Image (cartoon, rainbow, N blue to C red):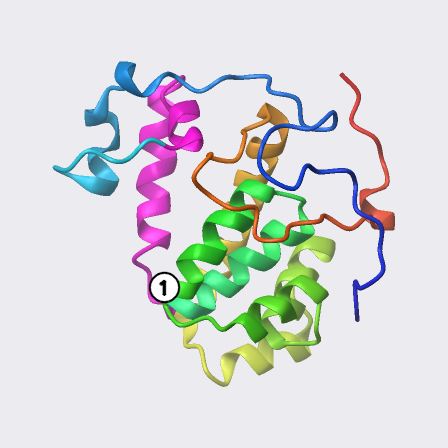
Amino acid sequence: MSEHGESPTGHRENGGSTPENPVRISPVPYDEWDHDLFSVINHPRKLPEANVLGIFQRHPALARAFLTFNMHLNTSTLPVRVRELAVMRVAWRRGSKYEWASHVLIGRKFGVTEAEIEEVRTGADTLLNRAVDELDTDSGLSDATYAALAVDLDERQLMDLVFTIGAYTMLTMALNTFGVELDPVISDENFSFPKREWYSHKREG
């Protein structure tokens, strides 16, 4: 399957919110952060400023719960390259510029190639793209896809893969709903969210 030629939804090319993703919850300013809130993921150092973390500052109980789970996903049994390619595909399908740009950078650090990033962007028929697409569309994996994944992934890795895809799908919902803007220092990495039939409804304010 290919996504070349599909129309973008009008995202700006370099950060900022769009009419479809207005800022509904603004991040807490960095100089007002409670850095202890993030100790579960970066103790004892202070994390750099990031809009998504500024949003979590608005709800400390939720932040602690989600970030504890997210810390597991970021240190799970999955090979990092597998994790990042899966997250990028989630971000692309779900129209999250923030998640896409962030994880393209992380993926490159762990050896994801430009060709592999392009495969994610264009929806090439890779095993990981199929897995993400099936879970996103059908909330499950076909027997064929599951069996193909199980050739290289053991039981715990398969569990971590499914939970990773699910968790980052949930995160895209939050990023899109609350209008989390791209951090100024990060490029949008050529993000142009393609319209699809399954995503044809319009968000109304």
On the image, which quarter does residue 106 sit in?
bottom left
Look at the image and say whether residue 155 sits in the magenta stretch.
no
Where 205 sits versus 167, above or below? Answer: above
**Image coordinates for residue 171, horizontal then vertical, percent:** 52, 39
Q: Nearer the viewer, residue 116 or 160?
A: 116
**Image coordinates for residue 16, horizontal then vertical, percent:** 59, 30
The answer to whether 92 appears left or right of 48 in the picture is right
Q: At 43% across and 29% down in the image, what residue appears?
A: 51
Q: Which residues are magenta?
A: 50-79
Q: Nearer the viewer, residue 151 or 7?
A: 7
Question: Total marks drawn?
Answer: 1
Does dot 1 land on a helix, a strand or a loop? Answer: helix
Look at the image and say whether residue 60 sits in the magenta stretch.
yes
Q: Main secondary structure of the magenta part?
A: helix
Q: Nearer the viewer, residue 182 or 159?
A: 182
Where 62 sits versus 97, above or below? Answer: above
On the image, which quarter does residue 110 sit in?
bottom left
Q: At 49% across and 73% down in the image, what residue appears?
A: 113
**Image coordinates for residue 76, horizontal then vertical, percent:** 33, 60
The answer to whether 117 appears left or right of 66 in the picture is right
Q: Nearer the viewer, residue 187 or 105?
A: 187
Q: At 36% across and 21% down in the image, what residue appears?
A: 57
Near mark 1 (Cα within 10 A), the count class, few <14, some 14-19 or many ≥20, is: few
On the image, which quarter does residue 15 sit in?
top right
Question: Which quadrant does the C terminus fall into?
Answer: top right
Q: Residue furthest left?
A: 44
* Residue where numbered disc 1 is placed: 109
Where 52 sits versus 2, above or below? Answer: above
Circle 1: residue type: Lys
**Image coordinates for residue 130, horizontal then vertical, percent:** 67, 69
Question: Which quadrant does the N terminus fall into?
Answer: bottom right
